[in-house]
Amino acid sequence: MSQLGQAQVGTLKSTPKLTRINGDDNVKVIYRNLGNNHAYPFVWATEATISGSDEVVIASGIKWHGYDLASYATVVITPLITSSNNFHVDKDTTNNIIKIKSTATESNGVDFDVMWMLGGDFTAEGLSCRGNTGATQSLP
């Protein structure tokens, strides 16, 4: 009965583990608390400003557990003022650089809220309700 409570994967045994999700009172971050003083941030926020140029670097050369941030993160930017310019996130995955770019030079400056989320693409396949109702997966 030593196999009770354990999942069998190939010839290796693994015990499923819970991961605590924590926030911080003073820092804009949500992280996985993996125990033993290991924390893994996966959602965080920062601020950036474009002033006097048509782009600003918001991340350069950052790697997370072997993944380049430019390839592994989703970045959402929100300008804090109304501007006639269009803004977009430019990811240079070759050099691992992420920039905010504008269609024109902003002489007055534009402030942005920036949110990062780590992870690969999500697919809803395989998710289902497995309660006692017998409900099955229903995707749009």
Image (tube, rainbow, N blue to C red):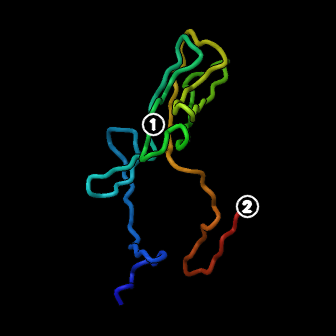
**Front-most of 75 and 27?**
75
The image position of residue 117, as x and y in percent, is 50, 44
Residue 70, compared with residue 20, is above or below; it is above
The image position of residue 61, as x and y in percent, is 45, 32
SS under mark 2: loop
Q: What residue appears at the point 31 percent right and 52 percent down from the top-left corner?
A: 38
* Amino acid type at mark 1: Ala
The residue to which callout 2 is attached is 140
The image position of residue 83, as x and y in percent, is 63, 19
Q: What residue appears at the point 53 percent right and 31 percent down from the top-left corner?
A: 95
How many neighbours does mark 2 have within 10 angstroms: few (below 14), some (14-19), or many (20 or more)? few
The C terminus sits in image quarter: bottom right
The image position of residue 17, as x and y in percent, is 38, 68
The N terminus sits in image quarter: bottom left
**Front-most of 54 and 45?**
54
Residue 51, compared with residue 139, is above or below; it is above
Q: Residue furthest left?
A: 36
Identify the mark at residue 45; answer none if there is no mark.
Answer: 1
How many neighbours does mark 1 have within 10 angstroms: few (below 14), some (14-19), or many (20 or more)? some
